[in-house]
Image (tube, rainbow, N blue to C red):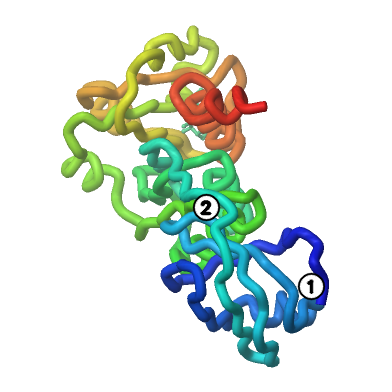
Amino acid sequence: MTDRAPKIRVFVDAALHEGQDLAIVEQAHYLTNVMRQGVGDAILVFNGRDGEWRARLTRVGKREVSARVEACTAPQRNPPDLWLIFAPIKKTRTDFIVEKAAELGAARICPVQTAHTNAERIRVDRLQAHAVEAAEQCGGTYVPQVTALERLDRLLDAWPAGRRVMFCDEGRAGASTVLGDLHGQAGPWAILIGPEGGFSQAERDRLTQLPGAVPVSLGPRILRADTAAVAALALWQAVLGDWDAAGAKP
Ligand code: SAH
């Protein structure tokens, strides 16, 4: 039994409220064998909807850990309405993109098939698990949803009116960044990052004509897609996102 402040954060599916009993299966091994938690130890739990709560372990088994929810430790905090749309690349680099998007504050992560995408198949469940792990680790109370792989042209066919796109176009490398065009444009947004093969001319033409699309340069060098995703998320967050409010707090 210890009273130190709990640092271990675990994502659960169940609704969270005081007195709720939780059955934790997925992280049972992590909690008992890796973190050596026992009955009476306190952990933090969140479910992506109800904020963060302290929970105390009431039973510890090999396959399942039980815990009772005690008190809310942080309110639910959702990221801005920002989608990250990207063409999947090699497995570990795709994992990296999902992890970083969850940390940097994307609301939704949408892998797309573009003309020059040569990603085989993607495992959405595995990518979703990476997003959960990133949220557990970065103190977030929200987990971005990873959507199924979709063709870019189909996504654009059904593009929601009013959602702007920060279209990261390697064809503009070295041009002025036009980040100024983002200023003051609150509302739903998406960031679009192409594959290692870049965008086709047809895709570029269509994207440039999309209402609300802002073609953007990420500087004079051609970045790898994973670097480009991180850079674009950071730039967008700095101009339009939730970083300012967080940074202003003492
Ligand atoms: N093979 C392409 C590069 C693709 S880089 C070529 O040589 O031209 C992968 C993706 O990262 C691009 O589709 C784009 O979305 C983004 N990107 C990389 N560097 C960029 C830059 N300087 N400006 C804007 N977007 C960039």
Report the number of numbered marks.
2
Find residue 241 and report its horizontal and vertical position in percent.
47, 28
Give the answer, above or below, for where 45 lies relative to 163.
below
Report helix, strand or loop for mark 1: loop
Q: Relative to the observer, which residue lies in front, 37 or 230?
A: 37
Give the answer, above or below, for where 136 lies relative to 205.
below
Examine the image and state in which quarter residue 161 appears: top left
Q: Relative to the observer, which residue lies in front, 119 or 44?
A: 44
Find residue 46 and report its horizontal and vertical position in percent.
53, 62
Find residue 219 and report its horizontal and vertical position in percent.
57, 17
Q: Relative to the observer, which residue lies in front, 206 or 202?
A: 206
Q: Which badge, 2 or 1, is on the more N-terminal residue?
A: 1
**Circle 1: residue type:** Met
Quarter of the picture holding the N terminus: bottom right
| Residue matched to label 2 | 141
**Circle 2: residue type:** Thr
Give the answer, above or below, for where 191 lies relative to 34.
above
The answer to whether any part of residue 9 appears in the image is yes
The CA distance from mark 2 to mark 1 is 21 Å
| Residue matched to label 1 | 35
Please state if 101 lies on the left or on the right of 80 as rendered. right
Q: Residues within 10 Å of mark 2 (few under 14, many from 20)?
A: many
